[in-house]
Amino acid sequence: MSRFFMHFWSDELCDLHYRSGLSGAPLEFTAGEGFLQAGVQPGDIIYIISVYDGQVMLIGRITVGQIVTSYSEAVTLIAPDVEEAPEYVLPAEGLATAQYFTRQLMMEEAGDLRFLTAEGSTKPLKFAGDEEVDEHALVGVREIAPASAVILDQVLSQPFHDQHPEAESDEEEDEIDDMDLTAIARSFGDETLNRRVRNAAVEFVVGAFEEKGWTVMPVDDPEEGYDLQCTIGDDHLHVVVKGNANDALEFTLSELEYTRAERDGHFALCLVAGALSGSPTLTTFSGEDLYDLFDARPLQWAFRYHEEEDLDTEDF
């Protein structure tokens, strides 16, 4: 029976692969030390992970074909310029996923992962704070429980792609420039109006879904990253509701909502244009639609003061 492991890649290694254009290419190997000591054998499954800003990134998965301990053999099997390492794990033929470097696990998914101890018991990931995992606790090769492998496989089954940092659009004139970004920010600057628009939009979406036979349940926990759970028969959708006072197809997403759009195969975004008018219009988009049909740029940064620093401000 296969066993399941995680192997940690550093930020530097991920960035090197990312900028070398390997995003989307199948994993060819993973290298380091500790595979044999951990008991890794052909047929076992290894999930490649990393950590960025305290968040777990799932790079990809390989089914072990062979473990090579000779550098000269690795040069022959992999590439003449392969970096020297104590051990190289090569996938069985055709049993490696594509590698992506910005595929982030949701915090609840990371929190549900469990390591296997030498005694056969399980323990969760170690967190450095409420919203960050302890990177040092993930370094090396770690065996995980079969249920954790199921979680990671579900993540890998969802459509995903990286945007290469040097990729150029053929239609640069359609991108959101600084002036457009400022205009979008201004259009959502009135909090009182935003609340009215949102309430009207949610009411309209609920009515539209219920009219078509869906059961609609509001989601009160903001950590879920969506507003409505809609079910009909065996189908269900995680719906994010956005509204506009005007007819523009513009909206903003939180980081959680953006992650849902990337990763959740049941994600739907319902945009209500003219939400306060007598004739609002509803358009529904999938997560893939957001990539294909929209331009996007970050709108805000979040700041938190270093607690270990003495407060020092400028006097005017």
Image (tube, rainbow, N blue to C red):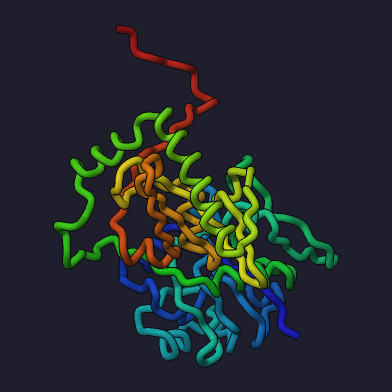
Which residue appears farthest toward the left when viewing the image? 173
Q: Quadrant of the C terminus?
A: top left
Question: Is residue 4 or residue 67 the one in the foreground?
Answer: 4
Numbered label tally: 0
Question: Residue at position x 63%, y 75% from top?
Answer: 35
Query: How far across and down, in percent of the image, does residue 45 sit?
Result: 63, 79
One can see residue 101 in this view: no
Query: How far across and down, in percent of the image, does residue 251 sit?
Result: 36, 47
277 left or right, relative to 133? left
Question: Residue at position x 42%, y 90% from top?
Answer: 76
Question: Residue at position x 73%, y 72% from top?
Answer: 146
Which residue appears farthest toward the top when viewing the image? 316
Question: Is residue 136 or residue 153 the one in the foreground?
Answer: 153
One can see residue 198 in this view: yes
289 left or right, relative to 230? left
Q: Is residue 294 above or below residue 280?
A: below
Which residue appears farthest toward the front when viewing the image? 278
Q: Quadrant of residue 110?
A: bottom right
Q: Is residue 26 above or below residue 210?
A: below
Q: Quadrant of the N terminus?
A: bottom right
Q: Is residue 67 above or below residue 297?
A: below
Which residue appears farthest toward the bottom when viewing the image? 93
Query: How far across and down, in percent of the image, does residue 306 sit?
Result: 49, 28
Query: How far across and down, in percent of the image, does residue 95 sit?
Result: 54, 87
